[in-house]
Image (spheres, rainbow, N blue to C red):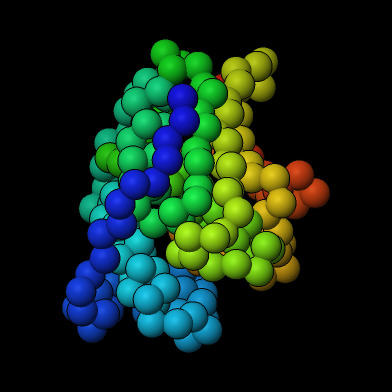
């Protein structure tokens, strides 16, 4: 299944987006600190898009630490489809997302935490690919970023891989999206790792995790 970006919805007022983000996120959290670092180094159009993205991802993932949500087992196909729909508006005009997962496989979720987690990783890879090619993801001339979401069940559990050839992942200074995804993975009882040599994020749910 392939998804292509068609439209982009942005807040018309960056101040409104800033207020919305501040209301939802602890200003001392690594997610917020790393977001501000990225925010300061981008032109206004990308700043507004970034604020919109941050609010959307946090809303989708819920604040599980202050509003506990019961853990459920959900069909992986539906979770990934919703994550892609969340990622598409901010992943860049030249981003294609290809999904290859066992749709009926069950996966642990709380609210829409897993959707927010996967969407954050998809957008992060698309952004990293655009930066690696030295062309803004907003530019019509940008090369296509092909982001793949693959999953496999084995004896150890369920592994979900989000990858993008050509994306450069900085393991020494991960992005705010990766920080957000890592927090959500921990609350879902999963582990999130980086394989920078193959431009891949790996999310693993162990069979023995509760």
Identified at 44% across, 54% down, the residue is 93
In the orientation shown, which residue stands out farthest toward the front?
141
| Closest to the observer, 28 or 168 | 168
Q: Is residue 152 above or below residue 201?
A: above
Answer with the quarter of the image where residue 24 lies. bottom left
Q: Tag count in the figure?
A: 0
Residue 209, horizontal then vertical, whole percent: 53, 30
- Residue 110 visible in image: no
In the orientation shown, which residue stands out farthest toward the right?
197
- Residue 99 visible in image: yes
Answer with the quarter of the image where residue 47 lies. bottom left
Q: Is residue 142 left or right of residue 103?
A: right
Residue 48, horizontal then vertical, whole percent: 33, 74
Identified at 70% across, 45% down, the residue is 165
Residue 86, horizontal then vertical, whole percent: 34, 46
Q: Is residue 14 above or below residue 82?
A: below
Identified at 71% across, 59% down, the residue is 168
| Closest to the observer, 108 or 137 | 137
Q: Is residue 184 left or right of residue 52?
A: right
Residue 129, horizontal then vertical, whole percent: 63, 57
Identified at 24% across, 74% down, the residue is 17
């Amino acid at each position: 299944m392939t998804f292509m970006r068609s439209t982009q919805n942005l807040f018309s007022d960056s101040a409104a987006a800033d207020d919305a983000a501040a209301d939802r996120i602890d200003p001392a959290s690594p997610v917020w600190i790393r977001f501000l670092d990225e925010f300061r180094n981008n032109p206004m159009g990308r700043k507004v898009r970034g604020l919109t993205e941050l609010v959307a991802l946090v809303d989708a993932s819920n604040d599980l630490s202050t509003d506990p949500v019961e853990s459920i087992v959900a069909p992986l196909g539906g979770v990934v489809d919703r994550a892609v729909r969340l990622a598409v508006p901010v992943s860049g005009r030249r981003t294609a997302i290809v999904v290859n997962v066992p749709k009926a496989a069950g996966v642990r979720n709380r609210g829409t935490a897993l959707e927010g987690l996967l969407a954050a990783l998809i957008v992060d890879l698309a952004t990293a690919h655009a930066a690696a090619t030295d062309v803004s993801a907003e530019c019509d001339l940008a090369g296509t970023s092909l982001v793949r979401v693959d999953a496999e069940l084995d004896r150890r559990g369920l592994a979900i891989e989000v990858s993008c050839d050509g994306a450069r992942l900085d393991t020494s200074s991960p992005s705010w999206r990766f920080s957000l995804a890592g927090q959500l993975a921990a609350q879902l009882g999963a582990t999130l790792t980086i394989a920078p040599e193959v431009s891949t994020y790996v999310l693993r749910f162990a069979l023995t995790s509760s």
